[in-house]
Amino acid sequence: MDRVEAIRSRLAQAFAPCELTVTDDSHRHVGHAGARDGRGHFSVRLISAAFEGMAPLARHRAIYAALGELMQTDIHALSIDARTNEES
């Protein structure tokens, strides 16, 4: 499974989103010091009722938790846009 699909799969399982977009932005960071270890740069847009009542920092922490070890093995940088259905 490629990295984008692994990220998408974990987030879909954890949040049952009505919208989920995962983009690999690694090509924009070629030569960046953080890219040398082979981990990638990704952007995530996630809209889910699961975020209702959660502050933005709590949403980010929940996403990091759902991604688990991918944050250490596959992801160097993650840009997150996490919203509720009403905020979308």
Image (tube, rainbow, N blue to C red):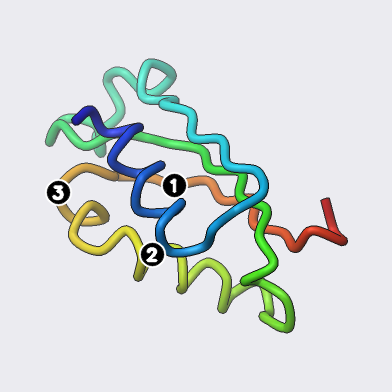
Is label 3 in a helix, a strand or a loop?
helix
Rendered location of residue 71, percent (x, y): 26, 55
Q: Is 70 rendered above or below residue 52?
A: above
Residue marked by disc 2: 64
Q: CA distance from mark 3 to mark 2?
A: 13 Å
Q: Which residue is mark 3?
A: 73
| SS for callout 2 | helix
* Alpha carbon separation for disc pair 3 and 1: 13 Å
Figure quadrant of residue 8: top left
Q: Nearer the viewer, residue 14 or 57?
A: 14
Which residue is pictured at 21% across the width and 37% down the height?
Answer: 39
Given the image, on which type of amino acid does mark 3 rest?
Answer: Thr
Marks 3 and 2, the one that precedes in the sequence: 2
Label 3 crowding class (10 Å Cα cut-off): few <14, some 14-19, many 20+?
few
Residue contact at pointers 1 and 2, CB within 8 angstroms? yes
Residue sitting at the far bottom: 53
Which residue is labeled 1 in the image?
78
Most foreground residue, 43 or 67:
67
Which label's residue is closer to the chain start, 3 or 1? 3
Residue in the image at 60% along x and 53% along y: 17
- Image coordinates of residue 46 in percent, x first then y, are 61, 50
At numbered mark 1, what does the secondary structure look like: helix, strand or loop? strand
